[in-house]
Image (cartoon, helix red, strand yellow):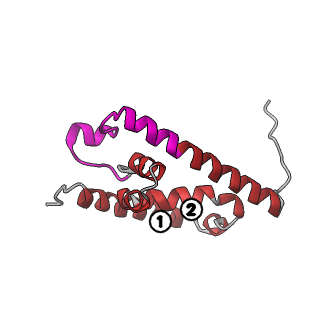
Amino acid sequence: MITPVVTAPLTPVGRLRQTALRCALAAGAAPAVATLHSWHDPGVLCPLRRFTGIPCPVCGSTTVFVEAGHGHWLAALTANPVTVVAVLGLLTAPLGGGAWWWRLAPRTRGRLIASAAVISWVWQLNRLGVGLS
């Protein structure tokens, strides 16, 4: 039998520390990945886009990370704005600003996720010049 681990809630200082750690790790990993990508560009990573030419809703997420690592913030934002918002939300989650998310009904959360995916997909189709007709 597996016993669940119960931890005490984080104090405000603990939340700030955890957020700072997440941001520091991301800030360190992004330039490292960007440098590695500069040495060896593997090309298109998305299987859907590689084989069909049609991007998926999360296409551009690697580009977001690489462009941020190079310090090209606008290029990162335009590669996939939904990914940028999601990453910022995950990095700052310990601060507790996302508690509203869990108060939403599961169906509402699902609809918001589906809407974000559709918006992201339309963005990618437009960004990469794939026609919607």
How many residues crowd mark 1 within 10 Å: few (<14), some (14–19), many (20+)?
A: few
Badge 2 marks a residue whose secondary structure is helix
Q: Position of residue 125 (x, y in %)?
A: 25, 57
Q: Seen in the image, is 19 located left or right of residue 4? A: left
Of mark 1 and mark 2, the one earlier in the sequence is 2
- Residue at the far top: name it: 1
In the depicted view, which residue is nearer to us: 43 or 55?
43
Choose between 116 and 37: the one closer to the eye: 37
SS type, badge 1: helix
Locate the N terminus by quadrant. top right
Asked whether residue 62 appears in the rendered view, the answer is yes
Horizontal side of 133 relative to 44 (left or right) equals left
Residue bounds of the magenta highlight: 30-57
**Comparing labels 1 and 2, the label whose residue is closer to the camera:** 1
Q: Position of residue 109 (x, y in %)?
A: 53, 63
Residue 39 to residue 127: above or below: above
The residue lying at 51 percent from left, 39 percent from top is 32
- The residue that mark 1 highlights is 112
Q: Residue at x 31, y 62 (%)?
A: 123
Q: Which mark is residue 106?
A: 2
Question: Left of 57 or right of it: where is 129?
Answer: left
Relative placement, left or right, of 24 versus 3 is left
Image quadrant of residue 116? bottom left
Mark drawn on residue 94? none
Quick check: 32 above or below 109?
A: above
The amino acid at mark 2 is Pro
Q: Residue at x 80, y 40 (%)?
A: 4
